[in-house]
Amino acid sequence: MKKYAIIVAGGSGLRMGAALPKQFLLLNNKPLLYYTINTFLAAYDDLQIILVLPVDYTDMGQEVIDAYFDKSRIQITAGGDSRFQSVKNGLQLVEDESIIFVHDGVRCLLTTDLIHRCYRQAVETGTAVPAICSHDSVRLLTEDGNEVADRNQVMLVQTPQTFHSKILLPAFQIDYKDKFTDEATVVEAFGMKISLVEGEVNNIKITRPIDLVVAAQLLQEAEQGNQ
Ligand SMILES: Nc1ccn([C@@H]2O[C@H](COP(=O)(O)OP(=O)(O)OP(=O)(O)O)[C@@H](O)[C@H]2O)c(=O)n1
Ligand SMILES: C[C@](O)(CO)[C@H](O)COP(=O)(O)O
């Protein structure tokens, strides 16, 4: 089955507070986006990437591609004001019936194993959303304060959120709502059940400066493990 990875990197990284959007910050001397793109290209030879970038940073994104990758496998498009709109812009470049991975450009530590796991499940059930258990206790806010929740009933959701194009393309015709924080919420609103797959603890979303420190360490450990 044809495969597309829509890598959403259209955000501005306000919580990181850096001069550049965080997807272009360097991690062990390479832009963070390099690692994300590299892992998807390595996962499948027939996978095409649709890279969604802030409109003012498409040239910088093109420079990253020219420096490291086979350009014939990567298309660039401009992002929107919300993650939802960025995904929607990316979906406009999907031409064939396919399995579509939607991945945060800033989750740069995912592995090819996770991509393969998502693919297999999406082929089988149409949907595959990676998630991990909470290793913290969880409390719910209530009208008069808060109460404990059973953390075994909670899963922390990651990307790549992976779907058959027959599901994802029509689902994204829906009008935007604030609760659409990821593709699973959109597909659920379209009336489909979501199937979860085991995520990865190291598949962190680089959000704040501390995440860069953690990611650099994890990357170094992974590279040492590969030697
Ligand atoms: N309009 C947007 C907003 C976010 N994203 C992407 O969605 C992913 C997850 O979003 P987040 O971590 O929130 O990134 P930012 O929006 O850049 O960060 P912040 O919320 O701190 O500004 C990132 O890869 C980001 O680039 C996007 O493509 N288009
Ligand atoms: C898609 C996501 O990474 C799943 O955990 C998350 O919902 C993105 O949230 P953000 O507020 O845009 O960082």
Image: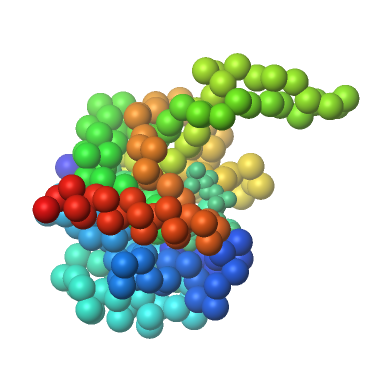
Q: Residue at x 53, y 61 (%)?
A: 209
Q: Report x, y in % for residue 52.
A: 41, 65
Q: Is residue 57 above or below residue 178?
A: below
Evaluate whether residue 176 shows in this view. yes
In this rendered view, identify the residue nearer to me: 107 or 4. 107
User: Would you identify the image quadrant in which residue 136 lies?
Assistant: top right
Residue 92 visible within the image: no
Picture quadrant where residue 118 is located: top left
Residue 49, percent from left and from top: 27, 60
Residue pictured at 27% horizontal, 50% vertical: 221
Vertical comparison of 148 with 131: above or below: above
Quadrant where the N terminus is found in the figure = top left
Which residue is pictured at 24% across the width and 50% down the height?
Answer: 222
Residue 132 in the image: above or below residue 215:
above
**Residue at x 54%, y 18% (from the top left corner):** 153
Q: How many marks?
A: 0
The reply, left or right, for residue 166 in relation to residue 212 is left
225 relative to 157 in the view: left or right: left
Where residue 149 appears, as percent x and y from the top left, is 65, 19
- Residue 189 pos. (x, y %): 56, 34
User: What's the colour scheme?
Assistant: rainbow
